[in-house]
Image (cartoon, helix red, strand yellow):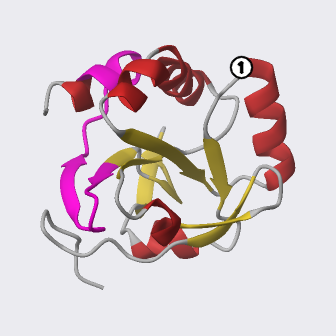
Amino acid sequence: MSELKIGDQAPAIHAKNQSGEIINLSDYSGKKVILYFYPKDNTPGCTTEACNFRDNYQSLLGKGFEILGVSIDSEQSHQKFISKFELPFNLLADEDQKIVNDYGVWVEKNMYGKKYMGTARTTFVIDEKGKIEHIIKKVDNKNASQQILDLY
């Protein structure tokens, strides 16, 4: 699969959220979507990033954004993560790794010389028509919301 670029149609998403409800990207047609991919619930960097989106949620909504987080964790893991940190947005369970593969963020990683496959922390901003407007590959966990707001 070729790498996604700005201007490309965002791949369709059909996945369960933390409550087991099916969420489709097309449900958000007419809205800008912050689609952020993160490696794992309840890990330090991912918690910092999620809480930054939580703390700036009203500003982002005010600018017309919806937020969807995606990781390969289960619905149950997402439920615990949301309730522990009072996250006001949906987290999608991508246990079969379809979404991370469709978006090209399932990559080989290297930690302490050990290679493994994992999710590259990446944020896609999708416009009202479902096209990719921005791709942030160097996400600053503490300032993830500001990175997006600075683009607009």
Magenta span contains residue 138 = yes
Q: In this view of the protein, can residue 113 be seen by the observer?
A: no
Start and end of the magenta stretch? 124-146
Q: Percent x, y for residue 97?
A: 60, 71
- Please tell me which residue is depicted at 36% across the width and 26% down the height of the picture: 62
Residue matched to label 1 = 85
Q: Is residue 2 left or right of residue 121?
A: left
| Secondary structure of the residue carrying numbered label 1 | helix
Q: Residue 17's image quarter? A: bottom right
Q: Is residue 29 left or right of residue 44?
A: left
Magenta span contains residue 130 = yes
Q: Percent x, y for residue 24?
A: 56, 69
Q: Would you place residue 56 above or below residue 17 in this image?
A: above
The amino acid beneath tag 1 is: Phe
The residue nearer to you, when weighing 45 against 88, is 88
- Please tell me which residue is depicted at 84% across the width and 34% down the height of the picture: 80
Q: Is residue 68 left or right of residue 148?
A: right
